[in-house]
Amino acid sequence: MIRSVLVANRGEIARRVFRTCRELGISTVAVHSDADAGAPHVWEADTAVRLPGDAPADTYLRGDLLVRAARAAGADAVHPGYGFLSENAAFAAAVTDAGLAWIGPPVAAIEAMASKTRAKELMAEAGVPLLAPVDPGQVTGADLPLLVKAAAGGGGRGMRVVSELDALEGELKAAAAEAASAFGDGEVFVEPYVVGGRHVEVQILADGHGTVWTLGTRDCSLQRRHQKVIEEAPAPGLSEELRTTLHGAAERAARAIGYRGAGTVEFLVDRAGRAYFLEMNTRLQVEHPVTEAIYRLDLVALQLSIAEGRPLDPAPPPSHGHAVEARLYAEDPAAGWQPQTGTLHRLELPDGVRLDSGVTDGDTIGVHYDPMLAKVIAWAPSRDEAVRKLAGALERARIHGPVTNRDLLVRSLRHPEFTDPGALDTGFYDRHLAELTDSDSGADSGAAGAALFALAGALADAHGRSRFGGFRNVPSGPQTKTYARAGTEHTIRYRLGRDGLRAEDFPGVRLLTLGSAEVVLEVDGLRRQFTIARYGDQVHVDAPPTPGTTTPASHTFTALPRFPDPTARTEPGSLLAPMPGTVVRIADGLTEGAQVTAGQPLLWLEAMKMEHKITAPAAGTLTALPVRTGQQVEVGALLAVVAEAAEATETG
């Protein structure tokens, strides 16, 4: 019997495992880096052990420290979660060698699947269909497009799509460098890239008594940078023949390596309905809640039961309905998916959906870990109902803090191509990102809509200040408030006296109710209710969604000072760090004085488990390069200066 579990992880998955442990009467042990000292998973655990340092390499990736923590806290089992060391055979072996129960598959099974190249060989022997590997030295134009993949690790790191022969060598080097940095293993391989393919996976569960469950399918085709964004179960639009093929292949894969516990077998399905093995994840997946929802199971509880040696029932229960999950990230999809940092002031979802989150109100979103804030999961009897339910919940969410992908998620779920299961494939965002991130689409998203929200914020601000002196009733001129949003300034002019509101540039707007946190306006005969929250100079304005739109009715403004600081300027051509991070690479041979071309990569920043390329904004001369490889920089730090060609001539 397992009595105490240490979760060798952090955030959302640690909280998820702790929740089940509490229900089963099992005590819990958390580990935390210094950056996570105040994180929710720490104070929710019965016991917590500090891992000195901030970086994953010094903390959550130190297997020796994790085993030592488990023994010091009196844990008798270790759950690895996902990511970090969850698929590290050496860590699993160290746990069992220490006399602790490993809540995961056997060490040999992890080793068998650790290298994607070795895994493919084993799957071929087991009769699992897969794509034939490509020899990089023998590639011709007829082989394109190709996919370069890291042999170790996952999460989309070390992956590159190659569409031109001349780019292959450079992408091989780049993928190898990223893989070596992320996983300590620079091995990569090449295989055909299937255009228009779907990412479909099968959840498996196996006990130590010969029973293997295949718990349906999941579709995870909506991805950015080869990382999943929206997942659902069951995968829609598959024929019964294909489902049978996928289930059979997943079971053969599990039996071929003597699997035990929860795992996932991932496939690529082409337009012709042919399935190809991609990889096997020897752990619990991020998207496991959608499978739990349709099978009404607790996969973590089953993991614990299997680790205790109990058998599964001969067959799994039947599935019911449909479930969809969206990953809410602190990132800006319109700016190359750049991760965002700062204080998460508020994260609130309406009732009726499941929220799995590693953060809570007031937490700081830093640079050391993945930018996922939460997973939001909706279940309903049918796919259409589940999608509508999830989109509606995200639309009504109150998310105050860093920029997130919430608007993108809502628009994605309501996009005609997503609502048509036959149109799903991994190229969705390649085709539609521009329209999905258009900040001016939707009734409340354009300049006029945003200005209306700014008006509500200004009125609430005026009401708050009125407690210290009353509303001004001066006929000589209106009150003025200026806000910035997405690079656009909104100047609001209004007179708010005892006879009511008179707002310039807002014909047809009438004030109904006014408070410091709520404003109700009548807009062309329609009642609109706005809620306002302030955090420093940030003003968040939310409203119920406008019928017929695909964009949440929410805006964040920065209140601008009446007298801007004239010294807040940067030299023309300056490239500033878009987020805090580490300079992981500088282009080969790049030095001050070098001539660069527009769009030429200059250096790469790593933040939140992603690499971000910094490129020259124009052709010219590199006049400054004040950073070095390995240097940590804060947001807004100067990375480089490129003087445009004409400017360099004039000043030289």
Image (spheres, rainbow, N blue to C red):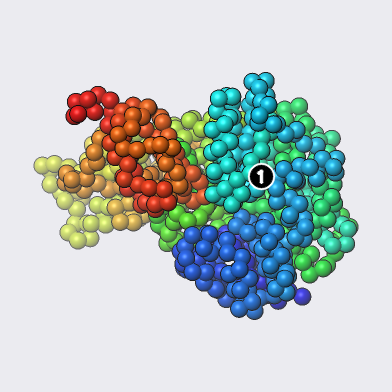
- Classify residue 148 by image quadrant: top right
Disc tally is 1
Residue 307 percent location from the top left of the image: 77, 66
What residue is disc 1 on?
Answer: 151
Q: Is residue 33 left or right of residue 534?
A: right
Residue displayed at 27% across by 48% down: 559
Query: Closest to the observer: 163 or 16?
Result: 163
Q: Amino acid at mark 1?
A: Ala
Residue 647 percent location from the top left of the image: 23, 27
Q: Quadrant of the C terminus?
A: top left
Q: Is label 1 in a helix, a strand or a loop?
A: loop
Residue 32 percent location from the top left of the image: 52, 67
- Classify residue 143 by image quadrant: top right
Q: Residue furthest front?
A: 589
Q: Is residue 322 visible?
A: no
- Classify residue 230 by image quadrant: top right
Residue displayed at 85% across by 51% down: 255
Q: Residue furthest left?
A: 476
Q: Is residue 12 visible?
A: yes
Residue displayed at 40% across by 57% down: 343
Disc 1: CA contacts within 10 A as few (<14), some (14-19) or many (>=20): many
Rendered view: 449 above or below 20: above
Q: Quadrant of the N terminus?
A: bottom right
Residue displayed at 54% across by 44% down: 178
